[in-house]
Amino acid sequence: MQQPVAIRSGAGVSIISLLNPASAVRNLASHWQLARQLAYRELVARYRTSWLGWTWSVLTPLALLVIYTFVFAVVFNTRWGKSPDEGKAEFALTMFCGMLVFSLFAEVINRAPSMIVDNPNYVKKVVFPLETLVVSGLLVALFNLLVGTVVWLVGWLLIKQAPPPITLLWLAIVLLPVCLTTVGLGWVLASLGVFVRDLSHAVVLGTQILFFATPIFYSLDRVPEFFRGWMMLNPLTHAVVNARKVMMYNELPDFVYLSISFAVSIALALLGYAFFMKSKRAFADVI
């Protein structure tokens, strides 16, 4: 018989110890296999009963790419301005870079407020490390990102008929602050979602607004100077711009903004973890 997973509760633990990066990493590392199993089970359950199965993980981003390309490249005749002979296919590749980054963030954030509420058995009946639910959600989003990146790579090879830029190797570094920010905000939203059930609706609306406030289907240079300053406060803006640099233009990322993003994302991840661990002792009383 499998032994129950030991829980690490925030009850009676000081906030200082919870903000210790080494303690947080040790706790999450001890439950790494569990997070992987949860992510795998969710992916299998998501596609198991559908006719096309795992093919949907490829068809979904492709369908969105076709729709957005038609609207912005054909109807609005939008261009990035990097190349005078830029075609619609190159526009689609460039836009897809931003969609990949944003989807990694939005998939976890939209689900976060209901992660605990949708799993009451983990809260009431089983001794379970609830913090791994957000981590497993991030792993699912990373799998979808990997599939989307392969789709982008195939598109690059077909359109450019050349190897991808060597700077593509920087993509993992560019996306690391996005992952840390996502998991930190995910812990906060997962905790608040237990006490405020309307939060999921507000979060979905917020991510839709953020989608248009992030330079995904337009260049940041085309934004008026006043609004551009506000958009630079959006952490996804820097991630999208840097992703395009390393994926499309064979340029190195902006290391100044990348360093700032690392510092801010680490702080957000630690704060989100501490908030979740301190508040999860009250989950069973509410659910």
Image: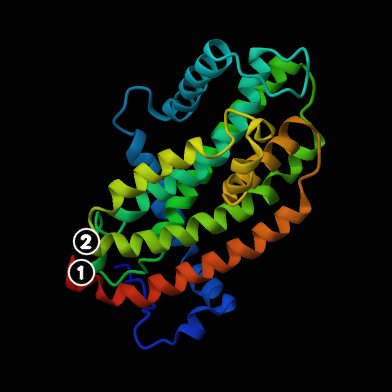
Which quadrant of the rendered structure holds the C terminus?
A: bottom left
- Residue 113 relative to residue 109: left or right: left
Cα–Cα gap, marks 1 and 2: 6 Å
Q: Which mark is residue 124?
A: 1
Q: Which percent across, then down, holds residue 139?
A: 49, 50
Q: Which percent across, then down, holds residue 153?
A: 66, 27
The residue type indicated by label 1 comes to: Lys
Q: Which percent across, then down, holds residue 201?
A: 28, 46
Q: Is residue 7 above or below residue 180?
A: below
Q: Is residue 283 above or below residue 13?
A: above
Work out whether residue 189 or residue 49 is closer to the camera in this orientation and state it: 189
- Residue 63 relative to residue 22: left or right: left
Q: Which percent across, then down, holds residue 209?
A: 43, 40
Which quadrant of the rendered structure holds the N terminus?
A: bottom left
At a point 20% along the width and 69% down the height, the residue shown is 124
- Residue 44 relative to residue 99: left or right: left
Q: Is residue 183 visible?
A: yes
Work out whether residue 107 or residue 265 is closer to the camera in this orientation and state it: 265
Q: Are marks 1 and 2 in contact (CB under 8 Å)?
A: yes
Density class for disc 2 (Cα within 10 Å; few <14, some 14-19, many ≥20) is some
The residue type indicated by label 2 comes to: Pro
**For mark 2, what is the residue?**
120
At a point 56% along the width and 53% down the height, the residue shown is 179
Query: How many discs mark residues in the rendered view?
Result: 2
